[in-house]
C-alpha cells in the first residue's frame, strides 16, 4: 500500500528507519501530472534501490510567469492512482508551508550555465529549481536521484549543485521517453489542443533531421540554424531558441572539429504551450 508523507516528521521517521536497516533509497522529484516518462524514472529507481520516494510538488519559485504557474496541470488524485501499482514506492506530497515556511533568501549563481537557453528566457527559473531540489535532497537524503534528459540544462545545473554543495548521492540521468510520433513526453502536453498536438510533431522531426544533417557535415552550423528557423516559420510556429551546444558545458558549437558530443536544444510554442526537447549524439 502506497504511503504518502505530507509532513516532515513522517518523512523523517521513514528515512531514519531505512538508514538504521542499511537500505538504499532512490528519489524521483516531480511536479505531478505524471506520465510514462515519470513512471520510467520510478521503474529505474525501483530496480536500483531498495525503496523509492517520488515527490510531487509544483514549486512556485521556479515559475517566472504567474499564468504559467496557475495553468500548470495538477491532478494529484490521478497521480496517486497511477502509483498504487508499485511496491516499495512512497510519495512525498508537501504543501507550500512545508517547503517554504519562510520565503527563501538564499540565491544561487550558476554563471554561464544559467544564462543561456532556459535561463535566458526564464530568468530566476534555475534559482527556484536549485532551491527546491536542494531542500528536497536535504529532506529525503537519497542514495540516488533520478532526472530526465529532456530537461538537459536542468540536469547540468543539478550536476553542479551536487558537486558544489557536496551532496552525498548519485545522480542518474535517464533517456527521454517519447510518444509514438516522437513527441517528448511532458506534463505540458496535456494542455495542447488536438490540432496543436498534431503540429507538435514538428519539434522532434526537426531535431532528428538536424541531427542527420550535422552527421553528414555538409552544412555549416549557421546554415543548419537558419534551416530550422525557416522550417518553423513556414509551419507558422514560434520557436524561442534552437541551439547547437556541447552536451556537457552547454557552450555553443561553432565548429564540429573539436567536439565529441553535441546536444541540439529547442524551445517552441504551440499556441500558448511552451515545449522543450533535445537530442544528444556523438560526431
Ligand atoms: O523537472 C521537474 O519536474 C522540476 O523542475 C523538479 C526537478 C521536480 C523541481 O521542481
Image (cartoon, rainbow, N blue to C red):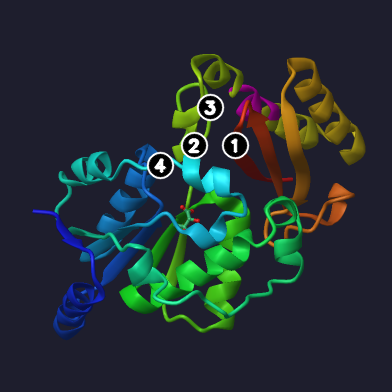
Where is residue 45? Give x, y as percent: 31, 58
Q: Secondary structure at mark 1?
A: strand
Above or below residue 147? Residue 135 is: below
Q: Give residue 112's position: percent from left, percent from top.
A: 77, 66
Counting the numbered discs, the total is 4
Look at discs 2 and 3 and give the one toward the viewer. Answer: 2
The answer to whether marks 3 and 1 mark residues whose Cβ atoms lie closer than 8 Å is no
Q: Which residue is mark 2?
A: 188
For disc 2, the neighbor class at 10 Å (few under 14, some 14 to 19, many from 20) is: some
Magenta part of the protein: which range?
A: 201-206
Residue bearing mark 4? 37
Mark 2 in CB contact with mark 1 (< 8 angstroms): yes
Residue in the picture at 48% in, 44% down: 70
Helix or strand or loop: what does disc 4 sit on? helix
User: Residue 49 occupies which quadrant of the picture?
Assistant: bottom left
Q: Quadrant of the C terminus?
A: top right
Q: Is residue 254 magenta?
A: no
> Which one is earlier in the sequence, the residue at label 3 or at label 4?
4
Q: Are marks 1 and 4 in contact (CB under 8 Å)?
A: no
Disc number for residue 182: 3
At 51% from the left and 48% from the top, the residue drawn is 69
Q: Earlier in the sequence, mark 2 or mark 4?
A: 4
CA gap, disc 3 and disc 1: 13 Å
Residue 217 position (above or below residue 15): above
Q: Nearer the viewer, mark 2 or mark 4?
A: 2
Amino acid at each position: 500500500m502506497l504511503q504518502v508523507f505530507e509532513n516532515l516528521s513522517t518523512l523523517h521517521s521513514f528515512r531514519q528507519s531505512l538508514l538504521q536497516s542499511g537500505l538504499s533509497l532512490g528519489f524521483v522529484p516531480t511536479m505531478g501530472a505524471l506520465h510514462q516518462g515519470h513512471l520510467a524514472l520510478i521503474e529505474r529507481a525501483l530496480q536500483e534501490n531498495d525503496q523509492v520516494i517520488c515527490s510531487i510538488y509544483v514549486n512556485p519559485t521556479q515559475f517566472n510567469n504567474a499564468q504559467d504557474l496557475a495553468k500548470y496541470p495538477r491532478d494529484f488524485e490521478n497521480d496517486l492512482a497511477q502509483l498504487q501499482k508499485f511496491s516499495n514506492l512512497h510519495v512525498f506530497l508537501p504543501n507550500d508551508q512545508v517547503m517554504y515556511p519562510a520565503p527563501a533568501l538564499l540565491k544561487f549563481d550558476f554563471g554561464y550555465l544559467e544564462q543561456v537557453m532556459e535561463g535566458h528566457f526564464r530568468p530566476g527559473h534555475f534559482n527556484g529549481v536549485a532551491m527546491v531540489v536542494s531542500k528536497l535532497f536535504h529532506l529525503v537524503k537519497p542514495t540516488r536521484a533520478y532526472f530526465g534528459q529532456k530537461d538537459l540544462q536542468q540536469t547540468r545545473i543539478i550536476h553542479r549543485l551536487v558537486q558544489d554543495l557536496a551532496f552525498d548521492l548519485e545522480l542518474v540521468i535517464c533517456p527521454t521517453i517519447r510518444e509514438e510520433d516522437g513527441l517528448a513526453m511532458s506534463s505540458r502536453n496535456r494542455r495542447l489542443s488536438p490540432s496543436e498536438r498534431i503540429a507538435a510533431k514538428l519539434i522532434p522531426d526537426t531535431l532528428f533531421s538536424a541531427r542527420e544533417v550535422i552527421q553528414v557535415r555538409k552544412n555549416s552550423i549557421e546554415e543548419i540554424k537558419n534551416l530550422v528557423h525557416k522550417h518553423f516559420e513556414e509551419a507558422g510556429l514560434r520557436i524561442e531558441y534552437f541551439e547547437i551546444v556541447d552536451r556537457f558545458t552547454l557552450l555553443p558549437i561553432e565548429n564540429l572539429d573539436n567536439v565529441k558530443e553535441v546536444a541540439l536544444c529547442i524551445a517552441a510554442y504551440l499556441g500558448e504551450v511552451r515545449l522543450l526537447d533535445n537530442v544528444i549524439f556523438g560526431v
